[in-house]
Amino acid sequence: MKEPEFYRKKLDNGIVVVFEKRQIPVVAVSSSVRFGAQYESANIKGISHFIEHLVFKGTKKRNVMDIPRGIEGKGGMLNAFTSEEVTCYWNKLPSKYFSFGADISRDLVLNPVFEKEALERERKVILEEIKMYHDNPMSYVLEKIKELLYKPPFNLPIAGSVESVSGLSREKIVELFNSIYGTNNMVFCVVGKAEWEDVLKEAMKFPKVNKKINSIEIVKSHGELIEKRKGIDQAHEVIGFHMPLINDKNRYSADIFDSILGGGMSSRLFQEVREKRGLCYAIKTHLEQSKDYAHLMVYSGTTREKVIEVKEIVLKEIKKLKDLKKSDFEEAKETLLGLKQINKEKCDSTMVDLLQEELGGDAGTYYNYEEELGKVNLEDVKKLSEVKGYSFSALLPD
């Protein structure tokens, strides 16, 4: 298979540029800031997510309708997301509009106006978003497991709470934006049909501004929480435990572990809990890894009477991986390599993956996946079954 054309460079203005060239005439563009919820203290929790919403309400160059109309009018799409470690603003367009997509992306991180009336309207929107997560039982138990896996303030939701978001003044938001959104904290990532010289030209248009980000310690924890709620018919439960960081030598072992345990219909948990026993409709795992934290969550929805039984089966299946067979181990590697290839089909998916690797240290690591996965041996995966404590959250019908 032909190696992809990949480029990475840190420019004099401080910005890191990451580019994968493709021939299909589509291009995904993102401007990202290395600041997310993990850098927020409890009293401003949700401020990164609030800023992510607000930049779309207008910039010095464009009003609230110009931004989506400019992209969507050309057949493109645009969006943004806030995670623990980054706030990313991206769009995907026919490649002939690359410069326009780059300009929109750049405009959002450089020129938002934070108009007061629009800010107050958007505050209401975010408060409804927070209520939506609370009212959704699956979202709720996943937020609760994070609260149990870590100490404050990291364990608080990315969107913040009703109290913290209600208390964020315009002055505080503008102050944080001005103190964080500098080019030395930014990554400009492009995947698609473009020329490296044109990508560099767009990245050089970011004015050089240096800002300092102060880190907040992430402290691990364990705990258990069972709550009841009226008006629901299904019990929702999550087991969570810490895993190797994205820079850890066992990082790829965690991928294999996750795939065997809960990756799809052939996984151990799907077969044991759903197919063999019929105890649930949904059972799945979610592995999240960064340079500062990593955990695996196992979610399932079942009847109230079967919550403890499902929990015990999950823990038993984890322990059984200490006897993992070589054939299952090799099959999981093949599965992961196939999924990686399928995920590369979409340029915006690759863009996010490259950004994730860049946050971990170097976007180029993305292209070493097959080689690194091949270095994992059977014993590495078996050792991960020796879970040193776990957290458990459940929401039961009252």
Image (cartoon, rainbow, N blue to C red):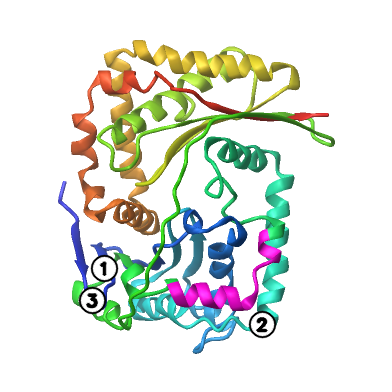
Measured in 3D between alpha carbons, the distance from the residue under mark 3 to the one under mark 1, in whole angstroms, is: 7 Å
For label 3, the crowd category at 10 Å Cα-Cα, with few meaning under 14, some 14 to 19 and many 20 or more, is some
Measured in 3D between alpha carbons, the distance from the residue under mark 2 to the one under mark 1, in whole angstroms, is: 33 Å
Measured in 3D between alpha carbons, the distance from the residue under mark 2 to the one under mark 3, in whole angstroms, is: 35 Å
Q: What residue type is labelled 3?
A: Leu
Q: Residue 17 carries which label?
A: 1
Q: Name the residue under label 3.
A: 200
Residue 72 seen in this snapshot: no
Q: Say which element carries label 3.
A: helix
Considering every residue shown, the one lying at the far bottom of the view is 61
Q: Name the residue under label 2.
A: 116
- 309 relative to 335, above or below: above
Q: Give how far across and how far down residue 85 sits, in percent.
A: 43, 55
In the rendered image, the quadrant that contains the C terminus is top right
Q: Give how far across and how far down residue 47 sits, in percent.
A: 57, 64
Residues in magenta?
164-179
Q: Which amino acid does label 2 sit on?
A: Lys
State which mark lies toward you, 2 or 3: 2
Query: Which residue occupies 73% across, 53% down?
Result: 131
Q: Nearer the viewer, residue 317 or 217?
A: 217
State which mark lies toward you, 2 or 1: 2
Lower sequence index among marks 3 and 1: 1
- Mark 3 and mark 1 in contact? Answer it, CB < 8 Å: yes
For label 2, the crowd category at 10 Å Cα-Cα, with few meaning under 14, some 14 to 19 and many 20 or more, is few
How many badges with numbers are in the image? 3
- Asked whether 44 falls inside the magenta stretch, the response is no
Query: Residue 143 lies in what quarter of the image?
Result: top right
Q: What residue type is labelled 1?
A: Val
Q: Which mark is residue 375?
A: none
- 28 relative to 361, above or below: below
- Mark 2 and mark 1 in contact? Answer it, CB < 8 Å: no
